[in-house]
Image (cartoon, helix red, strand yellow):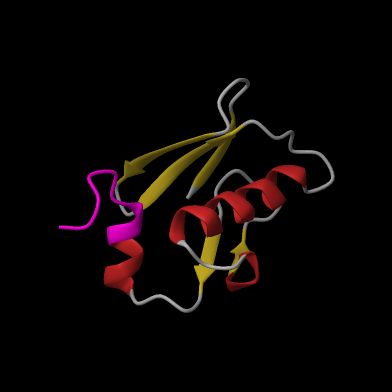
Amino acid sequence: MWANRLPRMCLSISERPNSLKVRLNAPPIDGKANDRLIRLLAGCLGVAPSQTRIVRGRPAREKQVLVTGLCAEKLQSRLDPAGPS
């Protein structure tokens, strides 16, 4: 996962090989962008923010995020912009 700052939009997700690119409108100061990323991903996936956490890359743009409570198929279908098949 790559996190970049996006000035006007609150969330933009695009797929990359084996990852997602997420653009946020929160500044990378005092963990605000990380907190925003967790809240937005949790909302998109329909899980509580406590079920979503950054396990690697907190200070970096490239992050590894762990989501608990969803199987891989449900996670993928919830991130699919076309919706569940």
Instruction: Name the quarter where the C terminus is drawn.
Output: bottom left
Q: Main secondary structure of the magenta part?
A: loop
The quarter of the picture where residue 53 lies is bottom right
- Residue 6 drawn at (x, y percent): 59, 26
Total count of labels: 0
**Residue at 31% from the left image edge and 69% from the top image edge:** 74
Residue 59: image x %, image y %?
Answer: 71, 50
Q: In x, y percent, where is residue 20?
A: 40, 47
- Residue furthest toward the left? 85
Q: In the rendering, at what x and y percent does residue 54 appear?
A: 62, 63
- Give the camera-side residue of 27 and 83: 83
Q: Is residue 12 above or below residue 44?
A: above
Residue at 62% x, 56% y: name it: 38
> Residue at position x 76%, y 44% from top?
32
Q: Quadrant of residue 8?
A: top right
Horizontally, residue 54 falls left or right of residue 22, namely right
* Looking at the image, residue 21 lies above or below residue 41: above
Q: Is residue 72 left or right of 68 when viewed as pictured?
A: left
Which residue range is magenta in the image? 77-85
Asked if residue 34 is positioned above or below residue 50 in the image, the reply reads above
Q: Is residue 80 left or right of residue 39?
A: left
**Residue 25, picture quadrant:** top right
